[in-house]
Image (tube, helix red, strand yellow):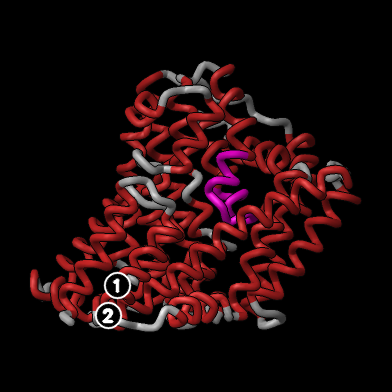
Amino acid sequence: MSESIAIAILLSTFVICVIIKVPITFAMVLSTAATMIYMQIPAMTLVQQMCKQLNSFSLLAIPFFILMGELMAAGGISSRLLKFANVCVGQITGGLAHVNVLASMLFGGISGSAIADVSSLGVLEIPMMEDAGYDKDFSIAVTVASSCQGLIIPPSHNMVLYSMVAGGVSVGSLFCAGYVPGVLLGISLMICCYVISKKRNYPKGEKVPFKEALLVTKDTFFAMLAMVIIIGGVSAGFFTATESAAVACIYCAIVGFFIYRELKVSVIPVILGNTVKTLSMVYGLIAAAGAFGWMMTYLNVPTLATHMLLGISDNKYIVLLLINIILLVLGCFMDLAPLVLIMAPILLPVVQSFGMSPIQFGVIMMLNLGIGLCTPPVGTALFTGCAIGHMKIEEVSKAILPLYLPMFITLMLITYIPALTMTLPNLLM
């Protein structure tokens, strides 16, 4: 039995399944099973590897982070963050575009999800910008592009996934590493929005009176405290990432029920249902990717990929550029979670051969695949924004083109300047 034929069976079966639109989870299971049949590996091995992948303590953080995002969305956090962002940057030219970006930065730092960001804030932001005189396609484009901040500004359950695949990289260090790139991305997007707003004569917002600004800031305090609990608790060593997520869920429920009083008992079954639905998809992907990844390792695919990339060039900067291009292209056709589970074991040995920290590469990977969420044909954040704004994807895709530039510049900066990602983890962890 030839190892090269087995690799061909594994990869070709997977690609064919994706092309004919078989769900990614089943595509990975079917391609792994077909390869195991050829290699005469017992079928029980497939089940064992799927179960083994889920037997990880760090994965307990994922349901808590998902539940926390749902509680935040239902508890009145979105509108308060939007008001606070307006106080901070609303009076600049293109004020509501800047409000949109800053609100996404703040909400992403609480929910950790790009889709939750678009779904929760987009309902408020898109009509608000349109009523103020902004083009509708631009309003949707800014909402979608800014949502990928939630993937790198902690907490991010996708970083927990990466931590597991990367061999137990510290989740706390990954969280700390995401702050500077996340803020840098937000500032880059705001600069781009300012230039576009000047060119198109978009309006400024009115300056908020000082007393009203104080009231808004006071009202947002309890929402912002959730980030302090998660990051401060993990960095100070009070609890693990999993424990911090559980504590944050309890805190968000208390804030929603007793402080903001917008979280109702009647919506709890819906929140739990959405959490379980999302969680079942995530855990199904993890289990399938565990077997798929084991099969790739068994066939030495990561080693072969490393040799192939290093065979193209031994120049660190060229290889890193190639890796970014590969991830950007793949992000256009596949969703984020399966790509993290499939590509991290393949590409991590390559970047480590150049001395790059797996923490830095985790942030690079998150931003790469986050851009993919904003890119057709399989950009789920783009689809969500278009559905909320009631516009065709083709129209919004044209409007989002200028916003790819600041995202790509940020990606190159964090790829080639390690200090942007590694300074905070080195200081705090």
Query: What amino acid is found at the position of numbered circle 1 in the picture?
Result: Thr
**Foreground residue among 265 and 243:** 265
Q: Residue at coordinates 53% horizontally, 53% vertically from top-left?
A: 150
Q: Is 108 in the magenta? A: yes
User: Badge 1: how crowded within 10 Å, few (<14), some, or many (20+)?
Assistant: many
Q: Left of 283 or right of it: where is 298? A: left
Instruction: Say which quarter of the image contains residue 411.
Output: bottom left
**Foreground residue among 322 and 428:** 322
Q: Left of 70 or right of it: where is 335? A: left
Residue wearing tag 2: 39
Position of the N terminus by quadrant: bottom left
Q: Residue at coordinates 47% horizontally, 38% vertically from top-left?
A: 144
Instruction: Say which quarter of the image contains residue 292.
Output: bottom left
Q: With respect to residue 129, does 144 lie above or below?
A: below
Under circle 2, the secondary element is helix
Whether pointer 1 and pointer 2 mark residues with C-beta atoms closer than 8 Å, the reply is yes
Q: Position of residue 381 (x, y in %)?
A: 48, 42
Query: What amino acid is found at the position of numbered circle 2 in the picture?
Result: Met
Extent of the magenta region: 105-119
Q: Residue at coordinates 49% horizontally, 63% vertically from top-left?
A: 285
Q: Position of residue 24 (x, y in %)?
A: 42, 56
Residue wearing tag 1: 35
Instruction: Say which quarter of the image contains residue 199.
Output: top left
Q: Main secondary structure of the magenta part?
A: helix
Under circle 1, the secondary element is helix
How far apart marks 1 and 2 lie (CA) works out to 6 Å
Furthest residue toward right: 258
Asked if residue 427 shows in the view, the reply is no
Q: With respect to residue 392, does 78 lie above or below?
A: below
Position of the C terminus by quadrant: bottom right
Q: Is 421 in the magenta? A: no
